Amino acid sequence: MSSPARRRRARCAAVALALALPARAAALDIKLWPLVRYARDETTGDVRCTAFGPLIEFRRTAETRDFFLRPFLGLHQRRGAGHDDRSDILYPLAATRWQEDYQTFRLLLFTYRTGTRAAPAPAPKETPPAPEWTSRFTLFPFVFYRSSPERGRQLSVAPFYLDLDDFAGYRRVRMVMFPAYLRLSEPQVERRYYAFPFVATYGGPGGRGFHVLPFYGRREIVGEERTSFVLWPFHIRSERLVPGYGWERRRLDLPFFAAIDGAGRRVRGYGLFAYTHAIDERKGTESIGAPWPFVFRQRRLGERDWQIWRVFPFYGRSDVKGISSRFYAWPAYRRKSEDVDDYHYERRRVLEFLWRRQTLVNEASGHHEMVTTMFPWLRSEEDDWRAFGQAPAVFDSLLPKNRGLLGLWAPLYGLVRWDTRPDGARGARGRPAPRPLAPGASPWRLRRSATRRARRARSRA
């Protein structure tokens, strides 16, 4: 056969092949298990590549980049206007985070932060807050370092010496050879402790008094409370100002009697929690405990049915403001559900973590979530169109929403893993987004239909 004839046949075959093949593949998925897997979605540009099983993994989407060298390193990068990068090193050993004006590094108890975030504007007629520290170094609860151009540097090493602002809920905390000396400063009260907590004095514009535990003490915070005791905690008297209701008086004579008397509230207790009876008009409830807190019941004022009934640990039920809970032979079985408007949530547990199922349905948006775990064998999740999980699930069955465990550790011991798409996106390409429920539709019907769709998608994947 002549050469021109062969060339003509080759050209015809090439044209026919070009016509037979699509102009562009919609997706590419190459598997050479367990060495390499490469998946790409041409429509979205999402890419996922793994090497040596779960040990090395790279994921790319339009918004994020993720890289894992399990279990040593996990990197996350957000692309776009907002700069937000994270890293986990042998989670939970160390972690870092970088943002435009904020950086943090954590190594177990050691924490370092630096940034230029502006302090919030003070409310009118309030003392302006101290300038925000630009650098922080913390080895909690021992070493504290702060630095800023306005306030200089501060270094505290507890328990020998500590001087910190805005710490532990106080405006300023100072200590020397704790518990030898401790000073707590509030806007109107100065508390000084010597041999904490046995000897204390109260001063400042709004504070007065002292105490020597457990023998005698008296304390007054002007306009807020007055307290005195003899042989604490056996004989205590106190008065507390409740905003909107006036002064409330409390008496305690252990182990015989306790009482609270104030506008809209009356409480009596006899014996060491042997019997308690409370009428709270502020909350509109009546409650009885005998003995409290093991046997307890509560109902709305003027009603006969009890909202809460508990005989711990054998049985308990509660139905308050759309939230319903039950337990039987705690911790053998517990159930909790919430139905408020378009929001429906249910959680069931057996032996707390041995078996758990959580379901969330939002009728307005059509969003559906379901998590099923069985320690240490299974973690199965559904998120709208996406169904994913693995078996076994040693740690992620206990903490199924923990980002560090799911990213670095769970893929290493999962023998069987599944997902509706290689890139792990929520929706499947070409499928419509979930639609809101019609008025009167059942959220549980939505959950069943979503489950069936997810199973069909998993069988096709």
Image (cartoon, rainbow, N blue to C red):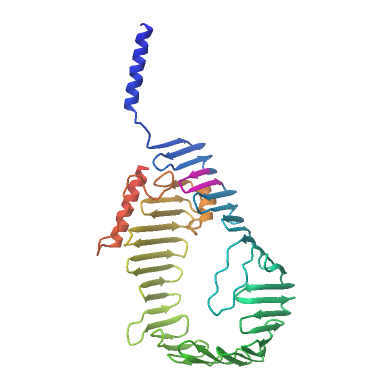
At x 69% / y 85%, what residue is drawn?
A: 198
Give the number of callouts: 0
Residue 258 coordinates in the image, percent (x, y): 51, 91
In this view of the protein, which residue sits in the foreground, 215 or 249?
249
Q: Quadrant of residue 112?
A: bottom right
Q: Residue furthest top?
A: 2
**Is 69 left, or right, of 375 in this rendering?**
right
Q: Is residue 150 visible?
A: yes
Residue 364 coordinates in the image, percent (x, y): 32, 62
Residue extent of the magenta highlight: 57-69
Q: Is residue 60 a member of the stretch shown in magenta?
A: yes
Image height of 439 relative to 96, above or below: below
Q: Is residue 432 a member of the stretch shown in magenta?
A: no
Q: Residue furthest front?
A: 124
Q: Is residue 268 visible?
A: no
Q: Quadrant of residue 212?
A: bottom right
At x 38% / y 51%, what residue is drawn?
A: 386
Image height of 115 relative to 170, above or below: above
Q: Quadrant of the C terminus?
A: top left
At x 64% / y 66%, what residue is drawn?
A: 133
**Is 304 left, or right, of 160 in this rendering?**
left
**Is 186 left, or right, of 427 in this rendering?**
right
Q: Quadrant of the N terminus?
A: top left
In this view of the protein, which residue sits in the foreground, 98 or 35?
98
Image height of 105 relative to 181, above or below: above
